[in-house]
Amino acid sequence: MKRFFQYANKKLENVKFASKTKFLIFTILGGTILIGFLMFISIFALKYDFEVLFENLTKPQVKLEEIKDIYQVNIKETLSAIKEKQISKAEGVEVLSLAEQIIKKQWKEYKKETGQQIGGLPEFANNWLNFFLLSSDKLKQSEFEERIIQNIEKKIKSINKKITKLIFILNEKNTINTKQIINNTILETNSLNIYLSTLITNNLKRAISKKEANDRLFSTSTLMLVFLITLSFIFMILISIIIINNFQELHYSLEENVARKTKELRALNISLESRVKKEVENSRKKDNIMFQQARLASMGEVLHNIAHQWRQPLGALMMIIQGFGSKFERGKLDEKFIRSSIDDALRLGKNMSDTLDDFRNFFIPNRAKQIFEVKKAINKSIELTKYQLEKEDISLEFNSNITAKIYGFKNELIHVVLNLINNSKDILSSRENLDKKRILIITKQTKRKIIINIIDNGGGIKDDIITKIFDPYFTTKHKSMGTGIGLYMSKQLVERHMNGKIYCKSIKHKFGTEKLFDSAIFSVELPLEEKNYEQKKS
Amino acid sequence: MNKRNLDILGDFNILYIEDEPQLLKHTTMVLEDFVQNIFAVPTCKDALEIIKKNRIDIIITDINLKHENGIEFLKELKYEHEYNIPAIVATAYTDTEYLIDAIKLKVEDYIVKPINLKDLLNSMHDILLPIAQKKEIKKSYNMIRTISAVTDGKQVEMVKFILKNLDAESMFNYSYGDIMAQVDVSKPTVIKFFRQLLQKGILTKIQNKKYLFNENNLPSPSEEIDE
């Protein structure tokens, strides 16, 4: 059984699910229809047999009995009455001819009824059933029956002749032969009656045998039907079981598949997780490298700035030292000169030292968060870029009365503002035909946040790059100028370390003049976390 | 020329433009020992005011001034105001751009910051020396003219003749007769004059009609004045 199912499953493997379902439905439908059909056939075949039994074999017997009665009662009695002269000749003739007519009519009807075909659905069903049972039981008249009928017909005819003759004789008032003829006729009538009785008996016997045959047929057909129905039922069930089993198998295999795939997916998920982790690690490393690069880049710029800031006091210091020599040579080295020179030299030295500290504070990573004034941080950024802005002849304006303090990495905010100023500076320095190059820093403080806007009249940002402007390695500047990291790094710092936002757009700004300049505005939004701040403070 | 006589700077007025106050102050303090007047200003506008009011012999300017450019100022001065004052440009920049501008403007010198005082003074000296010399010559000439106006004119004529006819070796190859023929003087005057010169060692008789002119034995003018 198992092997059979396996075989069936194997065969059904390549059949589509929908086809299988259709096949199952058709099998059930077909089985039902077949069973129904067989039921109908059997019912109608039974009906046919019943009809044959009644109409062809039973009903005609009535006619035969009537004929028999007419001969017995009407003809025989009348003839006897005529013989005994109990009735008049005329009366006798009338009765006889009437009886003759009735007999003729009844015989005709009998013949008609026995030969009658049932037809219609029952016969059709019977034929079908016979076809199925491979038997043919056409109701055939036996030779014996035929002969009796022939004899009956012959007798009827001869009786008829005799009666006609008798009637003729009676009408001629000839009474000589009357008695003899009547006797003969009565005799013949008796024999006819015997024939008729025999026919009736025969017919009844046939009906009985027919009924027996029917019974046999019924039981056989019932058996056959039961067999067929059982067969189709079994076939139906078998097909259903096979298909259902196949479905089950399919279901199991699918379930198995799903389980396997799930497992694979899980494995993939795990490997993906590790890969993602690795990639994240990689990207973090990359970011770190980029930050390093960016730091180096801005370090270079700031170093440039520092160099310039050192150059002036250094020049003055050298002049003071040379002044000592020169004054000494000239003999003019007086106390006043020495004092003022020393004071100045010390001040200059201190200044240089401070500048160096700025640089150090800015670039030596200061990992500790602190509370600091935003304004001071911005001022520091401006200081660190002052020299470059002067060199590019860019005026920077920053007037702010904000007092907001935030808790975070001061150097990072300085760096962000520095980057944004440098970005504006780079754009402005590439605009050679610009009359006045300006950068404006405006700060706005609300209850919850502080916004630092850095505006430059460098022409604004083109639409096609505005979405890419914070992408890493994106730069509009010449390769040697920009690393393309500054803005990306600023965004990272603002979003990751300060929980803030950074965005930019093109605007038109007057910069305090009558003219409208195409400008770019970069905004840094920093949340003022009062609670946080208070906590840290305490 | 290794050791320059920086004393000549004492006659000149200097304009110094520098926007860095400390440097301006200290450079001024040093330079004022060497020059007659030093005008130290932080802006070109102030500088122009000074130039209009004072005689300026040399301008020392920084290139990179606050919102201004020293070279641009010099250009303006030269072409718009038609001042032709020698200039020294001092800057931290060594950019060729500025160098070319400076050369085109015929700036006298270009010194790189931080300023080396000696270099600056030497540069000033070199620029001012011709002017000083010109002044000196003019002064000497005026002196001679003054002397000749108050003393014996014949002696001056004779000195002129001797200096005029010195050959490459500072030799004077003329007899008294030649002198008398060229300069209208009597023989006793010539002999007396030559004796004086020989006594002072200014002229040395090598042989007959051949004298060596000893420049080194000339007394310095100031000494002469002092006497």
Image (cartoon, rainbow, N blue to C red):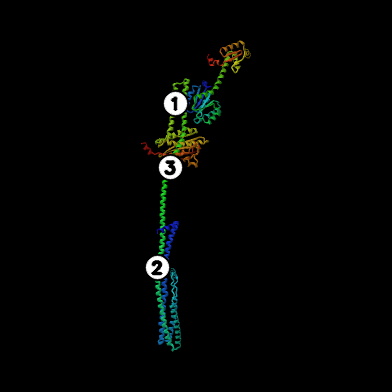
Q: Which mark is residue A280?
A: 3
Q: Are marks 1 and 3 on the same chain?
A: yes
**Which structural element holds mark 1?**
helix
Q: Locate residue A91 relative to residue B111 in the image: left or right.
A: left
Query: Could you say which is closer to the camera, residue A508 or residue A490?
Result: A490
Type of amino acid at the residue the image marks with label 3: Val
The alpha-carbon separation of the residues under discs 2 and 3 comes to 81 Å
What percent of the width, then of the height, locates residue B36? 51, 21
Q: Residue shown at 53%/31% (left/top)?
A: B96
N-terminal of the pair, mark 2 or mark 1, is 2
Q: Which mark is residue A345?
A: 1
Figure quadrant of the N terminus of chain A: bottom left
Q: Quadrant of residue A408?
A: top left
Q: Are marks 2 and 3 on the same chain?
A: yes
The alpha-carbon separation of the residues under discs 2 and 1 comes to 133 Å
Type of amino acid at the residue the image marks with label 1: Ala
- State the residue lying farthest toward the front: A3
Query: Could you say which is closer to the camera, residue A402 or residue A110?
Result: A110
Task: Specify whether residue A512 is in view.
Answer: no
**Which structural element holds mark 2?**
helix
N-terminal of the pair, mark 2 or mark 3, is 2
B204, above or below A355, in the image: above
Give neighbour class at mark 2: few <14, some 14-19, many 20+ (Cα, 10 Å). few
What percent of the width, then of the height, locates residue A414? 43, 35
Type of amino acid at the residue the image marks with label 2: Leu
What percent of the width, then of the height, locates residue A368? 39, 36
Viewer-nearest of labels 2 and 1? 2
Q: Which residue is mark 2?
A: A223
Viewer-nearest of labels 2 and 3? 2
Q: Quadrant of residue A71?
A: bottom left
